[in-house]
Amino acid sequence: MLPGRAEVVVIGGGVVGVSTAFHLAEAGVDVLLLERDELGEGSTSRAAGGVRAQFSDPVNIELGQRSLSAFEDFARRPGGEIDLKQFGYLFLLSDPEDVTTFERSVRLQNEFGVPSRMLTVAEACELSSYVVPDGLLAAAFSPTDGHCTPEAVVQGYAQAARQHGALLRRHCPVTGIEVTGGEITAVHTDFGSVETSTVVCAAGAWSASVGEFAGVKLPVRPLRRQVLVTEPVPDLPPRLPFTIDFSTSFYFHDEGPGLLIGMSDPDEEYGFRLNTDDRWLGRLADTLARRAPRLADIGVAHGWAGLYEVTPDHNALVGEAAGPSRFLYATGFSGHGFLQGPAIGEVMRDLVLGQPPVVDVTGLDVRRFADAGVRPEHNCV
Ligand SMILES: Cc1cc2nc3c(=O)[nH]c(=O)nc-3n(C[C@H](O)[C@H](O)[C@H](O)COP(=O)(O)OP(=O)(O)OC[C@H]3O[C@@H](n4cnc5c(N)ncnc54)[C@H](O)[C@@H]3O)c2cc1C
């Protein structure tokens, strides 16, 4: 059953939507979240779970750092066990230009209190013992980065949002947004309409179509990414950092008794495909044999595919549309939306309430594309 009216309707029940619903409900707002599938069934449950503050753009450093604090405090607020492992993120660098850029980023991160630092190749290989030094020049490391369980984060926020009075409706696709005289008046679903004046679009890779419902252009495109999980690895190091070979985007971290492994596929084309296939495996095997040869013979247990929600400059879209009034959006995280979920929920609460947001997200406004004011994020994988 849908309510006849809600103060705010959040569209999408991934990490961004449930965090937004939680922070709004906690602030006393009457909020309804509509998810067309199960909570977290979009990109969030398919994420590698990496959480970090090592970015090149100040706004991403702040969002990442603030979210890390929230993940550390998750058991208390909103509540729930998320299996946070702060074993660090290790970026392996083999291109002199990347070394210069990472040195600059580390200085910037340190200004924000992030304890990141540059490492020698020997130090990097000691921290991530599967890595061989060939071709590497340096590495960047931050010990407070790590990974946690996306489904648990979604359930933690969802449960606490409900406790604060939010309504979360699953299997309820939004099919339209009614706008009259430049103002939102209702949201339409397969199960009826809900009167509202305020919508938050948190629809991830599907945000462009939700924006269209209200006549708002959100340049977000879906791009499939595949990951696999290995069989148990003998002698898995106890504190293995989330390790990324930056020039190839090959990465791995511990996942139960095995490893979660991923890498981008430069031949992948934009689209909503979610099947897994073998096309990327040849390139992955070559990279793995070169960078972490001891892992080459480990068997694969299973794998999956999910969608990155990509914008033209690989930076998020967060803000309020110029029109219709009270259409807000938080989307297009381009591969780092899970780790920003907690802080973005706070930001969306503030934007809805018309108060200065906890992090200044002015630069993430979608109008930057019209103004040619793109702000590329360098530390993407
Ligand atoms: C393989 C892979 C690895 C990743 N690894 C990481 C990582 O390590 N760290 C990191 O930070 N990020 C990672 N990401 C990215 C991360 O998963 C996303 O950025 C993040 O989950 C986005 O969250 P979201 O809530 O915006 O979107 P989603 O989780 O996709 O949620 C959007 C929801 O909106 C719903 N929806 C869409 N349209 C409608 C509609 N019309 N009506 C109702 N509901 C609708 C969808 O069903 C969906 O559940 C990874 C992604 C992939 C694919």
Image: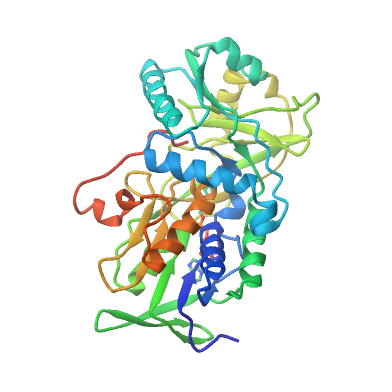
Q: Is residue 231 above or below residue 26?
A: above
Q: Residue at x 63, y 51 (%)?
A: 150
Q: How far across and how far down the image is residue 279, in percent? A: 54, 39
Q: Is residue 342 above or below residue 203?
A: above
Please name the colour scheme applied to the rendered image: rainbow
Q: Residue at x 55, y 70 (%)?
A: 25
Query: Could you say which quadrant of the image residue 170 lies in?
Result: bottom right
Q: Is residue 205 visible?
A: yes
Does residue 273 appear left or right of residue 80 in this picture? left
Q: How far across and how far down the image is residue 85, in percent? A: 68, 38
Q: Nearer the viewer, residue 106 or 190?
A: 106
Q: Nearer the viewer, residue 63 or 296?
A: 63
Which image quarter holds the N terminus?
bottom right
Q: How far across and how far down the image is residue 315, in percent? A: 37, 46
Q: Is residue 277 visible?
A: no
Does residue 239 appear left or right of residue 361 in this picture? right
Q: Residue furthest left?
A: 371
Q: How far across and how far down the image is residue 318, in percent? A: 37, 56
Total marks shown come to: 0
Q: Is residue 197 above or below residue 42?
A: below
Q: Residue at x 60, y 51 (%)?
A: 46
Q: Is residue 326 above or below residue 131?
A: below
Does residue 341 appear left or right of residue 101 in this picture? right
